[in-house]
Amino acid sequence: MNIAVIGLGYIGLPTAALLAASGHRVYGYDVNAPLRHGLQHGHLPEMEPPVRDAVLGALRDGHLHVLDRIPNAQAYVMCLPTPTHEGKPDLRYVEAAAAAVAAVAEPGAILVLESTVPPGATERVIEGALAAAGKQIGDFHVAHCPERVIPGAIMTELRTNARVVGGRTPQDARIVRDLYASFCEGPISVTSLAVAEFVKVVENTFRDVNIAFANELAIFAEELGVDVWETIELANHHPRVNILAPGPGVGGHCIPVDPHFLSDANPFVTELIQSARRVNDRMPYRIVRRIAELVDPGRGRKIALLGAAYKADVSDARESPTVRVDTLLRERGYSTAIYDPLVERFHRPLCGTLEETVSDADALILLTPHTLFATIRPEAVASLMRTPRLVDTRKFFDTADWQRCGFECYVLGRPFKSVAVRAVA
Ligand code: SAJ
């Protein structure tokens, strides 16, 4: 089949590569001209190594071509970002792509939207775009097939995850299921457009609400003077309980964003979802408040931050809690230094070495639990810091080791010194 993939970002490119590897003739298009030209010359943006290999392979063997316009094709797969602004979904990228596709697509073509959208949006946007081009939606096969891959394992999950295909008609769903079956080894369920849209947003909202629950428990446990980590571990031994882990906030471009697609559509029945968002958004403030209790804000106080990425072992720092924690600390008069050897792009310069980061610091905060941080030796860090204090927001380090090296330690969700005393009193 001739397939055009519109939007060559972190989902579009690997999807194009997989379709190409499955024998389709794939044409990639992105509005970003420097990206297109780079790809046409084999220059790839920063991406996970397995994605890079697959894309380079597809470009080299000629099954994937990056074009400067959207060609006429049998199928169009649209993979555009759908950010939110002040809690409102911004569908402009999807609308622009749909309009561009509608202008060239011929009756009988397959139109698939992979972007996460509020329920009802796929049909509304595609129907509107086709109508504006003087075409009828009934002459096309229209489906929503949301991407569900986890950053860090994109290639594997694209191949093996279960997929949901929502069709405008049952026939549309079956046609698109067969297209995805050409590269997806996981089970593919067919349903309506609105259910597929709802499923995707619900999955990420489930995770946001579950993490908010864990965060609320962490705060509760601190007040109670008990260990939330032990509590969650023991509760999760129950066969029907699976509480996620607390942390300094929820980052990434999906989980903190997608719940807004539901709360914006119906603010009156989404109390729990909105409240979970607030709980997670407040976590950076809570961490900074604890730091202020440990280190008097004042001139010359330095805080070292470990981790800029939004989660472990990825290079992506979008919506990272580190950004918020860093900003709040600096607003309160601390100077900060951030260390994350995995991250290349950040809103301010990162430190080149751990030594430079911790040198003369009054506290060290672990924000992102990168595996490579496990090799950090507390004795080496202690000798460089002005005051050896550790704030561990992920229960990452063995604090007994750090305490032996003279560190005062605070772990999120474990009794905090002043609070523990209050609880006992
Ligand atoms: N986090 C916690 N505690 C946890 C788990 C995660 O605080 O127990 C934090 C992470 O540190 C991170 C944030 O949540 O800051 C989000 O990380 P994540 O691993 O939960 O999710 P993402 O954003 O990397 O990917 C999610 C995935 N969705 C689900 O697991 C339901 C992925 O499958 C989706 O494809 C992706 O969103 C997306 O593109 O929508």
Image (cartoon, grey):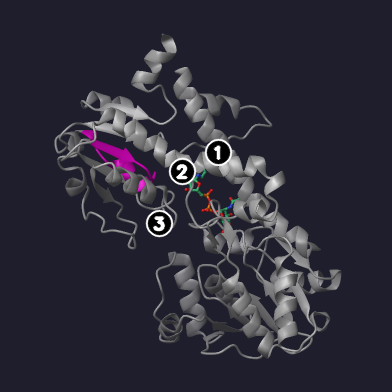
Please state the horizontal and vertical placement of residue 232, each as a whole percent of the image.
54, 28
Q: Quadrant of the N terminus?
A: bottom right
**Is residue 376 rendered magenta in the image?**
yes
State the SS at label 3. Answer: loop
Is 161 displayed left or right of 304 in the figure? right
State the SS at label 1. Answer: helix
Distance from the alpha carbon under mark 1 to that under mark 2:
9 Å
Rendered image quadrant of residue 273: top right
Residue 317 - label? 3
Q: Quadrant of the C terminus?
A: top left
What segment carries the magenta color?
A: 363-378
Label 2 belongs to which residue? 249
Disc 2 residue lies near ligand 1 with CB under 8 A? yes
Give yes or no for contact between labels 1 and 3 (Cβ–Cβ under 8 Å): no
Looking at marks 1 and 2 on the same chain, the residue that comes earlier in the sequence is marked by 1
Query: In front: 292, or 138?
Result: 292
Which residue extends farthest top?
Answer: 425
Rendered image quadrant of residue 110: bottom right
- Identity of the amino acid at label 1? Ala
Please state the horizontal and vertical placement of residue 52, each as a whole percent of the image.
45, 71
**Label 1 crowd bin: few (<14), some (14–19), many (20+), radius 10 Å:** many
Label 1 belongs to which residue? 212
Residue 56 appearing in the image: yes
